[in-house]
Amino acid sequence: MRNCMFPCRGACRYPVLTLAVLLFFAYICSKASKTEQKPSMGEGFNVDPTRAKRVQTFVTEVLQRKCKRSSTRKNMSALFPDRYKTDIRPFLRKNDVLSKAVFRYPPPFGFQSMERKLKEVLGLFPEAVQEERSVKSCSRCVVVGSGGIMRGLQVGQLLNQFDVVIRLNNAPVSNFIEDIGNKTTIRMSYPEGSPKSWDDVDPKTLFVAVIYKTVDFNWLKAMIKRETVSLWDRLFFGRGAKEIPIGISQFRILNPEIISQTAVDLLQFSEPRWKFWGWDQNVPTLGVTATVLATYLCDEVSLVGFGYDLTQPEAPLHYYENRRMDAMKGETMHNVDAEKQLLAKLVKAGVITDLTGGIHCSFCEN
Ligand SMILES: *[C@@H]1O[C@H](CO)[C@@H](O)[C@H](O)[C@H]1NC(C)=O
Ligand SMILES: *[C@@H]1O[C@H](CO)[C@@H](O)[C@H](O)[C@H]1NC(C)=O
């Protein structure tokens, strides 16, 4: 219990500071619980049945096509010569010989000066078993975005037929199985974004931790060891998972080279540098990062639930809540326009497939 006590070491000598810190913590907690929303099916929004049918037909077609081995990686290399590295390992594993590239940048682009923390967490894992790439001769990934565009499409059964289903953050599953399926091969998240209560019904789900800052390692360590995150560390998170009820062998750490590949090489954002507070708008969203990860995991990559249809202001922003599209406020942390352009380029070139057409619709009538 020692490390979940009050953050008192040294701090008790400074009662005012301690009080301020505690008040700040209380504020964060109250904010977090206020903004929390119960996932529920949307009311007052009816999906166009013609559109739903068209999406179902398109997904069926994609699943019936012959899967082409390595096609996404080959296509990426052709489209981004010298910029797409074909040999990045998706996850960091125990006993891996870690390349210098892993430590080149500060987080989330790399683990600069964090070798010890990384080793400590990797040390908790059992011996790495199999290679991560699917044993099937050709595998298909689908990355499930949280867009309201998913609602009412009834493609859950179809999505379950992909070899690898990647879900992001706290996007819920259990009340939405008809639309988004119940298979979760990978749930990818970071402390603040992680689900408050775990609702993946798939017992084989891997949790892929994305490390954005140094303290995220402490959180991950606590999750793996099923310990309580220390109050002091919770100051940094405020919300997110308090526990992740899966086995140790189901945790993974995203190789930060995937993030630097996405940000620096593909999106060509400014070179990462250390900043104490805030980001240079050069941190890619989890959605685009997961898409790049998928190119390393699977032979073919599809997206669903990506993109916002701003011509439908009354449509739900996310499939699991009733906030409307027009509630979307300006993004400051991420450069969403650049990301949308990159994804549109990949879809138009046929490198990845957009199953719901929110990025670029190849099955829509003009
Ligand atoms: C993508 O790969 C497929 C099959 O490997 C190939 O036929 C197609 O020409 C490639 N497209 C691009 C844009 O490289
Ligand atoms: C998903 O749902 C189907 C049908 O309800 C069920 O048979 C299957 O076991 C479920 N899969 C998982 C991973 O829970």
Image (spheres, rainbow, N blue to C red):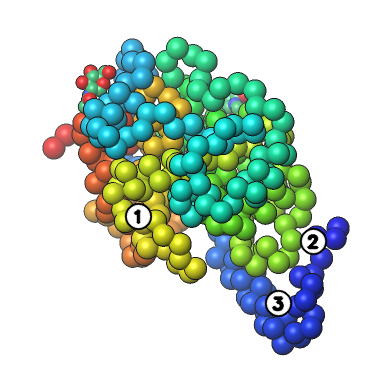
Residue 146 in sight: no
Mark-to-mark CA distance, 2 and 3: 15 Å
Residue under pointer 3: 22
Crowdedness of circle 2 by 10 Å Cα count: few (<14), some, many (20+)?
some
Residue 317: quadrant of the picture: bottom left
For the residue marked with disc 1, what is the amino acid? Glu
Element assignment for label 2: helix
Along the viewing direction, whichever of 221 and 119 lies nearer the viewer: 119
Along the viewing direction, whichever of 150 and 362 lies nearer the viewer: 362
For the residue marked with disc 2, what is the amino acid? Cys
Residue 283 position in % (x across, y down): 40, 54
In the image, farthest residue toward the right: 1
Q: Please tell me which residue is depicted at 61% across the width and 65% down the height of the picture.
A: 236
Residue under pointer 2: 4
Q: Which mark is in front, 1 or 3?
A: 1
**Vertical position of residue 101 compared to residue 283: above or below:** above
Mark-to-mark CA distance, 1 and 3: 36 Å
Residue 237 position in % (x across, y down): 61, 62
